[in-house]
Structures are given as structure tokens and as C-alpha cells.
Amino acid sequence: MFLQIVKYIGFKGVINMFQFIKHKLRKALDEKFVLSAYLLAIVFLFIVSLIYDLGKKIGLFIMML
């Protein structure tokens, strides 16, 4: 699944996305909002899952044409 995401948004995009999430998680942990960090991680994984599913549907649609 991770390789599919890399293929869709590019390697540099994945690195930038992880750095953004890491920065947000570190900021949340510094402010003692551990729950906020967990929620942000869950939302991030949900968005990645949606991108992956959307990519699969687009790929199947293109193959049907």
C-alpha cells in the first residue's frame, strides 16, 4: 500500500507529508496534547487510505476504457 501511495503522489511528496505530520505531532506533544497527536495520526491514516482507494478506483476505471 505504501508503494502505491509513493507512486501516486511521488517520493518527494511523501517525504514532505511525513515531515509535516512529524512537525504537527511534535508540536502537539510539546503542548502536552497527546490526544491531539493520536487524533492527527488517525486522520492522516484515514486520508492516506482514501487516497489509496481513490487511486485504485481510477486505475480500474482507466483499465475498463
Image (cartoon, grey):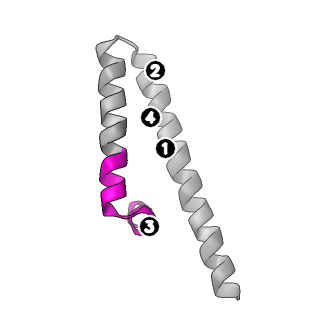
First of labels 2, 4 by sequence position: 2
Query: Which numbered circle lies on residue 45?
Result: 1
* Pointer 4 with pointer 3, Cβ within 8 A: no
3D distance between C-alphas at marks 3 and 2: 28 Å
- Which residue has dot 4 on it? 41
On whether residue 10 falls in the magenta region, the answer is yes
Q: Is residue 12 above or below residue 60?
A: above
- Residue 11, quarter of the rendered image: bottom left
Residue closest to the far bottom: 65
Report the front residue among 16 and 64. 16
Instruction: Say which amino acid is labelled 2.
Output: Ser
**Amino acid type indicated by mark 4:** Ala
Q: Could you tell whether 51 is left or right of 9 in the image? A: right
Specify the amino acid type for callout 3.
Gln
Question: Is the residue marked by circle 3 packed among few (<14), some (14-19), or many (20+) residues within 10 Å?
Answer: few
Q: CA distance from mark 2 to mark 4?
A: 9 Å
Give the labeled residue for mark 3: 4
Q: In the image, is residue 48 above or below residue 26?
A: below
Residue 25 lies left or right of residue 4; in this view the side is left
Q: Going 36% across and 29% down the picture, which residue do you hit?
A: 24
Nearest to N terminus: mark 4 or mark 3: 3
Q: Which residue is mark 2?
A: 36
Question: Would you say the residues marked 1 and 4 are in contact, meaning their CB atoms lie under 8 Å apart?
Answer: yes
**Residue 33 screen position, x and y as percent:** 40, 14
Start-end of magenta stretch = 1-17
Magenta segment includes 19:
no
Nearest to N terminus: mark 1 or mark 2: 2
Other-residue count near label 1 (Cα within 10 Å), few / some / many at <14 / 14–19 / ≥20: few
- Name the residue at 40% across, 60% down: 2
- Which type of secondary structure does the marked residue at label 2 adopt? helix
